[in-house]
Amino acid sequence: MRGIGVLSRLTVGLSLFAASLATAAAGQHTVVKRLETSSVLGMKGGILVKNGTPTTCELALVSNKLAFVAANCLEYKPNSNILDDSASYQVMVSDGGTGNVGTFSVESTEAHPKYNPITFANNVAIVKFSGGNDVQWKNYIAANPSDWSNEFYVKRSVSGGSWAMPQIQDSTGGAPAECGKASPLYASNTKDFMCTNKFTTTNKDGKTCASPFGTVYGVHDPNLAVAAIYSHSVVVGDSLCDSSTVYSYYTVLSNYLEWGGAVAGSTIYLYTEDMSYINNNDPNYAMVDPSGEPSISGLLVGGDLNSDQGVHIGPSSSSEDPAPTSSSAAAISTVPIAEEPSSSPEPAAEEEEPKKNHLTTIIIIIAAVLLLLAIIGYILWRKCRKRPAPTNMTTQYNDHQYAMGAQDYAPEYADDYNPNRQHLDNRIISRDSYPEDVKQRYSEDDVRNRDLID
């Protein structure tokens, strides 16, 4: 029974070990579920500062050291999709209202490996910054849309070095049908985007210009958490200052939490009311490539909207517009069209990674099973080997040798052996040599034994 108990514990231990190795091989799971109760004005917000100037790019703050930002807000080397290390970034953090928590240096940035600067697919990047160690805090990412009763579109901005009061708009009316007509990417990935035709306004050079919101919060009253960040807009007109129709698209972050946690090397917390909800745990997740052309003509803009640059799109204009250069990258992208990441060999290698992970998992499980069978066989062999040898109470041997409990050597007797005689150390002792009283006792015993047999 003791051997069975040890074997059971060993089996459980090996199973857990194999499961943990399989999990590690598959790259799961950096996301932990938590709850948060707050309001927009009570939740910290952030703005990306580039080369000393605040941008319109808002951050989805994860903690006092980590944030998501749109990949088209970063600078890239000319004619390359490699981030420009000469660009200087800072993160400016608010207390949720007009109070300033601080401005922190950015330590590293990394764009999603399948970010497409032409279509703005997978338009996310990770920013790690020195948020200080005096006060540690974390925000949560809203991941389960079925929880939400509403969405809040929020615009945070900095003017003259000070935070303006956030502007908030709910999602009454939902996404307009024109969102899919203006963006084939949105039509192919409706679960990866939020879309609205609502916007705030700002004054620029004496003009009133449309200004898209920077972040979107999922609301389960009274709880809320940031769910998406601004990606790009399609402006029906020539600029944000000359149009009253703007369709803005926001990248949903929940599908990129596993990738972000792996890049940052830290846990990203998500918000959900339904604790049985399971979030996407694929670190290689990417949007579907769009097909077709937009059926609505307009100006495609994104990134830091302090610039009026953009690319005209429409049913027949996509091939007429010149490729953007790095000097006009602030509004659309700093990556040239010729360097589209989807055509490079690197994504193909990334697509093979899940297959390698699955193969590694299978090999580990098979090895664990074989090890378990070997241990079981060894334990059974030891039990059989330790079985005690049989004993013989009537015969003594000078040489005690056994093979699996069987006698190797037969006893040696004198040539005149008689079964009625006693033998000791192979020496036969005749009953005639016994004393008279002993011989008399043996004779009586023989008579009695014969009577019993009769």
Image: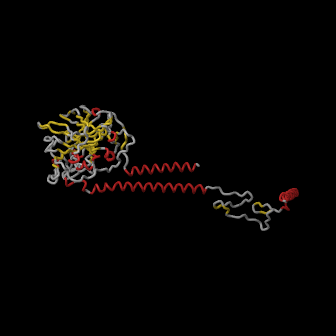
Give the camera-side residue of 286 and 161.
Answer: 286
Across and down, in percent, residue 258 comes to 33, 46
Determine the residue positioned at 39% across, 42% down: 276
Across and down, in percent, residue 240 comes to 15, 42
Residue 352 in which image quadrant? bottom left
Outermost residue toward the bottom in this view: 415
Outermost residue toward the left in this view: 206
Q: In this view, does 355 lie above or below 93?
A: below
Residue 446 in which image quadrant? bottom right
Quarter occupied by the C terminus: bottom right
Determine the residue positioned at 24% across, 56% down: 343
Residue 243 visible in image: yes
Across and down, in percent, residue 297 comes to 16, 48
Tally of marks: 0
Across and down, in percent, residue 158 comes to 20, 35
Residue 357 in which image quadrant? bottom left
**What colouring does the structure picture have?**
secondary structure
Determine the residue positioned at 52% across, 55% down: 375
Q: In this view, does 44 lie to the left or right of 320?
A: right
Give the camera-side residue of 449 and 419.
Answer: 449
Residue 435 visible in image: no
